[in-house]
């Protein structure tokens, strides 16, 4: 059976236009892509290529139209056929407002007030570099290189990115490494225990590459059922160079062959409302309970593939348990059937009050999954961003594992859809002599009591413990010091005390909330203001590279971080080692030509400068296909070489790590609520709260662009049942209070969110008087999150595990 794709141009253009119309009174001429020339079309004009480099994963392509050294307007990608164009979304098309914003940081500055007040005075580059030199020299000599941490950040992706900073600090003796990230912290940490890691390459497990996960284009070819857990490409993967395009093709194909798309989420997200056949509402944080109930139905109705489970898996049942754990009813099957330690069968009736999904509907979904020839089960990264996230992400993978639907055409491994198999160019190289790695979400604890943090109480890797508290934070293009971190009020207390972390360096383009905590604040040149190069984004339908710029001169005294780092290196007598005789632009060319030589198909440097963009199509990918075809020749990177449903390594960790009260680590992917999860609401805080990605921002990037805020306002979603009890109506300003803090936010009363749970878009800019009542009128969800790293990953699970009370705010 065949199906017809909408053109890429039509698909992406339509979604952008709809959002634009939502912004009343906003002139689209200034904001959006257009083929119409400006009135001065007869004046000399040139094209400068660039990309949207913030972390939605898209890296959509820009064509800046430049006249007299100034950008006049932007087109997106017009190269190739309309079905093969990396065209930008609403956010990317507003980038000119960022470039030319009156809020741009223009000069180096030093702090003159208390940390967090945002009070600075202008200084020269010479003074800034001198201060940075002196602080680094003192900190390294006094505390050692393990007192330096480059904070997690995703505000700028390119072949340079944060690497000039890493290269500089590596030459100075190194810095504590970043473990995992805020996007997939729990998933990255726990998945190697189930699916292994690539030991041959010595790489960290990538749960969404084309080896471990299947592509949406594979689903388009063969799948007859798509089941998505907390996955909304229409919000998290917008733009023509991103996975929303791939997902649109899946919808058309699956429907054409009589199949369905079912979206399981606590709210009717944009993908569910626009593309799914069914939205299955679920209480936030309870996905593992639903999965256990589905698998109970598989077992009872003969839907499990027992041959597959015996041949490819460890820990499914008594037969496949590790020898020393046999006879203890510790297998996943015994857990589901109620033969394990809790003696509770995981029936649909058991799951119903936990998940809020009727038992009959759970049975219906189980039946659909068993009947499907090629079910494509996938998850977004929201389900693992809970306090029980390590178990949740594995539990979702158990659905296709139990069915034996892995490594076959049209199937997936339960993980997120695949990323591209090949990135054509590399980044500025560095080699960090320090091997100690700190989980990124633990940076605040490392400032407060780093010298007490070990492998077994804090997830330190590469060493037995940290040798020092963190005394220097280096923050480039990121808002994770506060805004995107957890428990902003507590974080403020730690950062504001400059006897703890003695030096904070921040590099950015505008004054974010995190930038207010800088001791030295440096103005960065944006990608379009320098020669820039970057690969494609997360979309798996193509691989490519874009090279271009500068489109216009950086304003004020903004400089590239590479040039600044070279100047800092010079103060230590290391300029030659840092640059290796190459300028920023010469490094860019060098990195491109290295990639081109390895690839063999890319254009020459001269050609790419002329054409700006190179793209080629990628083949569909089937996750774990080689393993399925021949598990002996292609074993997984687990101790057994198989899928480890029961992990002996996790069982050992559970019995040997120092866990706090309320923390649990499990050898199998059980359902447990986790702190502030199911059953943890109180009379004071009777509602659950979870965050979601918002169309007006990429995390907190674009959060200050006014027209985007108008197009997609910061609103709390609340079900009419919960709103009526509180006398709340659409548009009311509400107070939302958690054990950690309080915000003010506009109400959106809608049945698109499950009763008992409110939804708040993440990434809004924190706005509070931190020397006063600390009430956040910017409605940043991390004012509400508690700072409690998860048991195994030590990650940001509390991001979506929150309990709150909502009231109508007094005038």
Image (cartoon, rainbow, N blue to C red):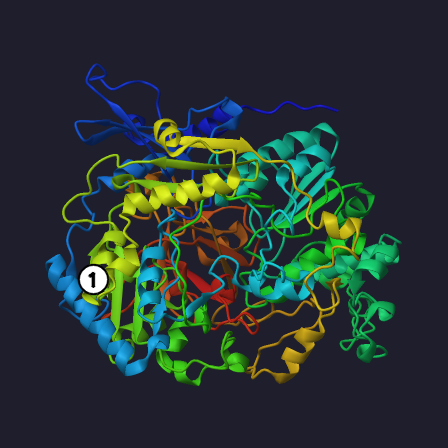
Can residue 775 be spotted in the picture?
no
Please report the residue visible at 24 percent of the width from the left and 67 percent of the height from the top: 116
- Observer-nearest of 153 and 607: 607
Q: Which of the 4 image quadrants contains residue 191?
A: bottom right
Task: From the top left corner, tell me how far across and down residue 20 is, in percent.
Answer: 38, 31
Q: Is 267 on the left or on the right of 748, as rendered?
A: right
Dot 1: what SS? helix
Residue at image location 42% in from the left, 72% down from the top: 434
Would you call the spot at circle 1 few (<14 residues within 10 Å), some (14-19), or many (20 or more)? some
Q: How many marks?
A: 1
At horizontal 63% and vertical 64% (from top left) the residue drawn is: 192
Name the outermost residue toward the top.
42
Residue 717 lies left or right of residue 272; in this view the side is: left
- The answer to whether residue 456 is above or below residue 107 is below
Is residue 353 left or right of 454 when viewed as pictured?
Answer: right
Q: Position of residue 316 (x, y in %)?
A: 80, 65
* Position above or below: 448 against 396: below
Residue 783 seen by the camera:
yes
Q: Quadrant of the C terminus?
A: bottom left
Q: Place residue 73 in its image quadrant.
A: top left
Name the residue carrying label 1. 570
Residue 643: x %, y % from top left: 74, 61
> Where in the figure is residue 467, as x and y percent of width and height?
40, 82
Q: On the picture, is 556 further left or further right than 174? A: left
720 or 221, nearer to the observer: 221
Query: Which quadrant, please, contains the N terminus?
Result: top right
């Amino acid at each position: 059976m065949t199906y017809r794709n909408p053109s890429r141009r039509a698909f992406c253009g339509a979604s952008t236009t709809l959002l634009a119309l939502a912004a009343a009174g906003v002139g689209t001429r200034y904001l959006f892509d257009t083929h119409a020339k400006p009135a001065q079309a007869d004046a000399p004009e040139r094209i400068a290529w660039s990309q949207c480099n913030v972390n939605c994963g898209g890296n959509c392509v820009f064509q800046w139209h430049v006249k007299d050294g100034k950008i006049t307007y932007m087109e997106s990608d017009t190269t190739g056929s309309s079905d093969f164009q990396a065209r930008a979304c609403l956010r990317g098309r507003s980038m000119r407002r960022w470039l030319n914003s009156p809020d741009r940081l223009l000069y180096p500055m030093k702090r003159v007030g208390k940390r967090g007040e945002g009070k600075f005075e202008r200084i020269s580059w010479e003074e800034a570099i001198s201060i940075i030199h002196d602080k680094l020299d003192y900190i390294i000599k006094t505390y050692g290189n393990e007192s330096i941490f480059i904070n997690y950040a995703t505000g700028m992706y390119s072949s340079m990115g944060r690497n000039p900073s890493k290269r500089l600090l590596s030459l100075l003796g190194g810095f504590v490494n970043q473990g995992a990230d805020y996007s997939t912290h729990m998933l990255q940490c726990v998945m190697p225990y189930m699916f292994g890691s690539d030991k041959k390459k010595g790489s960290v497990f990538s749960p969404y590459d084309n080896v471990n996960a299947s592509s949406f284009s594979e689903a388009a070819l063969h799948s007859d059922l798509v089941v998505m857990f907390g996955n909304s490409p229409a919000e998290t993967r917008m733009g023509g160079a991103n996975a929303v395009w791939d997902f649109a093709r899946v919808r058309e194909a699956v429907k054409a062959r009589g199949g369905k798309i079912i979206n399981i989420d606590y709210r009717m997200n944009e993908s569910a409302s626009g593309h799914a056949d069914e939205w299955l509402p679920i209480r936030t944080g309870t996905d593992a309970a639903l999965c256990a109930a589905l698998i109970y139905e598989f077992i009872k109705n003969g839907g499990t593939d027992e041959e597959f489970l015996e041949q490819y898996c460890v820990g499914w049942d008594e037969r496949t348990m590790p020898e020393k754990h046999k006879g203890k009813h510790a297998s996943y099957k015994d857990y589901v059937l109620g033969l394990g330690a809790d003696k509770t069968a995981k029936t649909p009736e058991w799951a119903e009050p936990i998940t809020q999904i009727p038992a009959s509907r759970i049975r219906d979904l189980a039946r659909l999954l068993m009947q499907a020839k090629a079910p494509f089960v996938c998850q977004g990264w929201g389900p693992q961003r809970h306090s029980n996230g390590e178990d949740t992400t594995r539990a979702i993978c158990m659905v296709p594992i139990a069915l034996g639907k892995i490594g076959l055409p049209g199937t997936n491994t339960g993980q997120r859809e695949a990323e591209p198999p090949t990135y054509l160019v590399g980044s500025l190289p560095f080699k960090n002599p320090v091997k100690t790695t700190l989980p990124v979400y633990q940076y605040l604890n490392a400032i407060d009591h780093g010298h007490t943090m070990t492998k077994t109480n804090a997830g330190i890797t590469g060493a037995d413990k940290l040798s020092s508290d963190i005394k220097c934070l280096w923050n480039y293009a990121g808002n994770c010091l506060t805004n995107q971190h957890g428990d902003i009020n507590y974080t403020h207390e730690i950062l504001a005390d400059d006897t703890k972390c003695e030096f904070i360096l921040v590099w950015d383009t505008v004054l974010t909330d995190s930038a207010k905590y800088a001791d030295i604040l440096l103005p960065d040149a944006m990608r379009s203001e320098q020669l820039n190069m970057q690969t494609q984004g997360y979309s798996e339908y193509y691989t490519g590279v874009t090279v271009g710029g500068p489109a216009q001169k950086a304003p004020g005294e903004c400089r590239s971080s590479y040039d600044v780092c070279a100047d800092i290196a010079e103060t230590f007598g290391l300029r030659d080692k840092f640059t290796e005789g190459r300028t920023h632009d010469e490094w860019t060319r060098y990195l491109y030509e290295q990639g081109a030589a390895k690839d063999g198909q890319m254009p020459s440097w001269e050609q790419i400068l002329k054409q700006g963009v190179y793209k080629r199509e990628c083949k569909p990918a089937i996750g774990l296909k080689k393993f399925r075809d021949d598990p002996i020749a292609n074993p997984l990177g687990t101790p057994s070489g198989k899928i480890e449903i029961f992990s002996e390594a996790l069982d050992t960790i559970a019995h040997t790590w120092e866990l706090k009260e309320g923390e649990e680590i499990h050898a199998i992917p059980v359902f447990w609520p986790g702190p502030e999860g199911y059953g943890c609401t109180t009379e004071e805080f009777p509602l659950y709260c979870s965050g979601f990605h918002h169309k007006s921002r990429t995390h907190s990037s674009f959060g200050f662009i006014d027209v985007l805020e108008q197009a997609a306002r910061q609103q709390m979603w609340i079900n009419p049942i919960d709103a009526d009890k509180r006398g709340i109506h659409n548009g009311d300003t509400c107070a939302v209070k958690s054990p950690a803090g309080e915000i003010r936010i506009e109400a959106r009363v809608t049945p698109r969110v499950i009763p008992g749970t409110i939804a708040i878009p993440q990434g809004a800019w924190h706005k509070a008087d931190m020397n006063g009542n600390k009430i956040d009128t910017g409605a940043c969800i991390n004012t509400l999150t508690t700072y409690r790293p998860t048991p195994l990953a030590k990650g940001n699970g509390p991001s979506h595990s929150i309990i709150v009370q909502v009231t109508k705010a007094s005038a």
